[in-house]
Amino acid sequence: MAKQIFELALIPEVGDVPERMHAQLIRPERFGEPKDAFRIEEVPVPELGPRDVLLYVMAAGVNYNNVWAALGVPLDVIKARQKAGEKENFHIGGSDASGIVWKVGAEVRNVKVGDEVVVHCGYWDPNDPHVVAGKDPMLAPSQRIWGYETNWGSFAQFTKVQDHQCLPKPAHLSWEEAAAFMLVGATAYRMLFGWAPHVVRPGDPVLIWGGAGGLGSMAIQLVKAAGGRPVAVVNSEDKFEYCKQLGAVGVINRKSFHHWGMLPHWTDDAGYGEWLAQARAFGRAFWDALGDKQNPAIVFEHPGEATVPTSGFVCETGGMVVICAGTSGYNATLDLRYHWMRQKRFQGSHFANDDQAKGVNDLVIARKVDPCLSRTFDFAGTGDCHQMMRENRHPNGNMAILVNAKQPGLKSLAESR
């Protein structure tokens, strides 16, 4: 007789794998607003390859990538995978997870059944020649973001990950706290420490856009842990104290300025002149927030279109603007005179490799970085929390979803039974 699907409220015996599971699915016919795109369905538990791990998901983190997956733009992730030969006509998202190793493939050696872990979202073919050669796997042709560009993410009772994605769960964190920090934390870690020689050093001033958000809250703490001086930019003064509690030495309200967007053409004397005056005023605001007349050695960018012109202008001579996203748009402009004459670096950065993910996990274990969990949803609220993120109504910091965890605050399998 086939095993029945496990109820979310019941934790089975470790290693007892059912044939089917509950999952929050996105299907092509439901592409649109996240509150409507996500729906709980029953699907088969995924099969494992030799280097795969089946994880019993206790909690999942929430990131903007699965807002995009729900909308079906800018990429139809289901169609993209079908073109690559996969058959599933659905997407199970979720690129952050905490949980318990439930089953392992034949060649897995770094984790065992029963281990409590967190998962990073870097995914690549271990046989990719780029990876085999020992090069950075995040630059490999086979690199994907698990739970967005791959299926079987963390919004399900069970998820399938590669063995190298698993790291020890910080024991002092609840399941939901442990699920909330890795994607943004490891992304920020690579941005700030992955592009030598432009890495944060003691005393360095660093400008951090969106300081109260999930990514910015990690960046502030990482800069502080390295002895740097983070200055955060936010969109309202009620977020100032939050950023300062995380370690920001000063905060700027971006709504005090009105020059955001694409750079006016240099032939537009009036438009460019107004932009330049505002950019210089922003630079002075950075000095005031820092308490020192120094420009940022590193500018931590992710808004993109609205802010890149200013980031490139205020960055220190020989400094770096490092960017991982374009949340305000991706058609960015730059005054190249300030770029080449002052020998600045404009660096793209995308998630993290294994060592960088371990780096941020180690800092969390050492309690030097907090996950900044601000709100936790139950499993049924998966669509609602993504809708909140889509509408920019989400609170400071990060959000998480309870999957198999029965209630917030539980920290281990023993506590969770």
Image (spheres, rainbow, N blue to C red):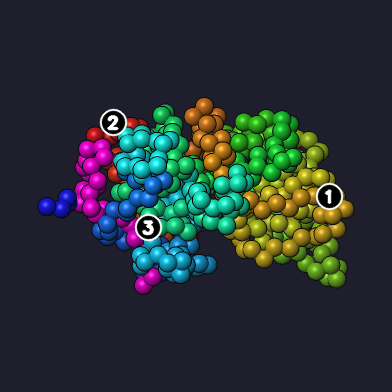
Q: CA distance from mark 1 to mark 2?
A: 55 Å
- The kind of residue tagged 1 is Gln
The disc, 1 or 2, on the residue closer to the chain's N-terminal end is: 1
Q: Position of residue 144 (x, y in %)?
A: 51, 55
Q: CA distance from mark 3 to mark 2?
A: 27 Å
Residue 10 shown in magenta: yes
- The kind of residue tagged 3 is Ile
- Residue behind mark 3: 92
Residue at 43%, 42% (x, y): give it. 163
The disc, 3 or 2, on the residue closer to the chain's N-terminal end is: 3
Residue 112 shown in magenta: no
- Residue behind mark 1: 343
- Look at the magenta stretch and give its main secondary structure: loop
Circle nearer the viewer, 3 or 2: 3
Residue stretch in magenta: 5-29
Q: Position of residue 405 (x, y in %)?
A: 30, 41
Describe residue 309's horizontal placement relative to residue 170 as left or right: right
Question: Is 163 in front, or is 352?
Answer: 163
